[in-house]
Image: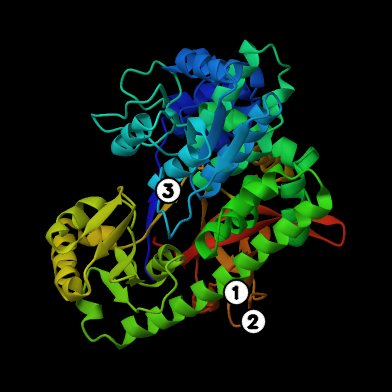
Amino acid sequence: MQKRWNILPADEQKTQALFESLKINRTICKILVQRGIDTFSKARHFFRPQLSELHDPWLMKDMEKAVSRIDNAIFQQEKILVFGDYDVDGTTSVASVYQFLKNKYRDVDYYIPHRYREGYGVSKAGIDFAKENNFTLIISLDCGIKSIELVHYAKTLGIDFIICDHHLPDDTIPDAVAILNPKQKDCPYPFKELCGCGVGFKLMQALSEKWNLPDESYLQFLDLVATAIAADIVEMTGENRILAFYGLKRVNEKPCAGITALLKLAKVDKALQITNLVYVIAPRINAAGRMDDAKKAVQLFIEKDTEKALEFAEMLHSDNTDRKEADSSITEEALEMIKNDKQSPHQKTTVVYQEHWHKGVVGIVASRLIDTYYRPTVVLTKSGDFIGGSARSIAGFNLYEAIHACREHLIGYGGHFAAAGLTLRPENLQLFRNAFEQAVSRQITPQLLIPEIIIDAEVSFTELTMGFFNILNQMEPYGPENMRPVFIAKKVYDTGFSKVVKDLHVRFVLKQGHTTFSGIGFNMADKFPILQLNQPMDIAFTVDLNEWNGEKNIQMKMIDIRLHAA
C-alpha cells in the first residue's frame, strides 16, 4: 500500500537555542522543540518527572463535595458501591478506588456491568442491584457523565451519585452530588486529559489528605493507573506522563499480584515499557469483557494471594486466546468477502455483515480491515432481533459525522471522531450501506485515503550511537503527543545481506557512506524487491535495541522504504 511521508518541520532558532543549553544531539533537540519542549526548564521537567509536580486534587471542581459525601457516608455507616465500565480504564479504576476505600471502611462493594446484558456505562440493572442491597452511595468511574436519566432514577430510590469521568460532558449534566471531570467547562483543574482511572486517583489523593493517610495509601495503585493510561490512549503529556512514568516503575519493581500473574503467563521476563502494557496487559483485561464478564478483571487486580491471582489470570489469558481466534477467523472471512465484492474497488467505505460473528471483536476486526483497505469501515453482526456493530475511521476523517448523516436508517448510534457503535434493523442494512458510502464520499478527500507516515526528523547513520539511543530511551513513556520518534535516512543502499524471513518479514543490512546498520521490517516482505534494485533508497524507521548473546546493538525497525527521490 502506497503511503504519504510527512516530515515535520521544527523552528530552527528554538532548536539551536535548546541545543546550546542541553548539549545533546541536535536531531533530538529538534524533536523536543516540535513537541513544545523548547527551554531548558521544560526539558528538565520532561526528562525528570516528579510526583511532587502532580496538581493539587482540590483544584478539581466538586472535589470538596465528593470527599465530604464519602466522609459522611462512612460516618453514617452507609453502604458504598464502586461502579465502573468493563474496559481496562473502568476495571483498573474500580479495583484501585474499591481497595483504597476498603482499607478504611468495611461496607464497600463494586459492580461492573455486563457488556451484552447491560451495555456501556451506568446501567439500570446496576442501580437496581444497589437498591436491592441497600447501597445509598454509588461512585461511578470512567462513566456517568451522560447518564442524566439513570442518575435521576437512582435519586428517586434514595441513592446518591458521585461521578468520576473524563468523557466530554454535554450541555446538561446529571444531578449528582459531585461530578469530578476536568473537561467540565467551569472546572479549574489545570490538566484536562486524565483517563477515568486518573480521575479516581485524584479522588484517592484528596481523601488520603483529608484522612491524614500516608502517600503510599494511593501511590500503591500507580501500576493500575499506568495500565489505564496506556490502554485508553490518552495524551502522554503533563500529569499523565508523571503518573505513567512512576506507574511503570512500580510495574517493574513492585506490581500487584494480578499484574505479576499476567506477566508470568505472557512469559515477560524483562523490564517493561509502556508498549508492553498496551500489547500484553490491556488485551487480556479487555478480553474478559469482550468474551465473558469483566468482573474477573477486578477480582484479578484486588487479589493479594499469588496463587489465586494466577487462577484469575489464567481465565483472562483463556478469554484472550478465544478473542484472538475469533478476531483472526472473522478478519479472514471479512477480507474474503471484500475481495469477492465487485463494487469494493470503486468504494470509499467498507461495510461487512455476518450474523454469526462474535460481537465482542467486531471493533478489532474493523481496525484490522483498515490495515488492508484503508477507508472508513463498519463491521456488523446479529444482536438479538437487530444488527449491531462497530465502526472505525482513518486518520483525519470524522466518522461520527458520517454515521450521524445516516441516522434515519439506524435505531441508535454513539461514538466520536475515530470510532463509533451502531444498531439497525436487518431490513435497513443495504439502505445504511448506501447512505454511509454517500456520506463518506461527500466528505472525504483522495489524500485522506492514502495512509500517512509522520516522520519527526532526518538522521544520518553516523548519529545512531548508543548515546543517541539512551537519550531517546529517556523520552519514554511514549504515547499520543509524545510518540516514539520516527526517522528518515536518505540515500541508503542495500549491502546484499537482506533476506525474507518466514515469507513475512524482511531482515536487512543497509549502508550510508561508510556506516552500516541492520534492521527488520515486520510483515514487510513485499518491500524486498525494492531492496534488490541496488539503487539509492530512503527509509522511514524507529530505533530499537537488539539483545543477542549478551550483546546489545542498535537496530532499525522499518516502517516504510522507497527509492530515493533525487
Q: Residue at x 17, y 75 (%)?
A: 427
**Callout 3: few (<14), some (14-19), or many (20+) C-alpha neighbours within 10 Å?**
few
The residue labelled by disc 3 is 125
Vertical order, 273 against 17 (above or below): below
Q: Is residue 390 rendered to the left or right of residue 57?
A: left
Tell me which amino acid carries mark 1: His
Disc 1 and disc 2 in contact, CB within 8 angstroms? yes
The quarter of the displayed image where residue 48 is located: top right
Q: Nearer the viewer, residue 180 or 147?
A: 147
Q: How many marks?
A: 3
| CA gap, disc 1 and disc 3 | 49 Å
Secondary structure at badge 2 equals: loop
Q: Quadrant of the N terminus?
A: bottom left
The quarter of the displayed image where residue 393 is located: bottom left
Tell me which amino acid carries mark 2: Lys
The residue labelled by disc 2 is 502
| CA gap, disc 1 and disc 2 | 7 Å
Q: Quadrant of the C terminus?
A: bottom left
In the image, which is nearer the foreground, mark 3 or mark 2? 3
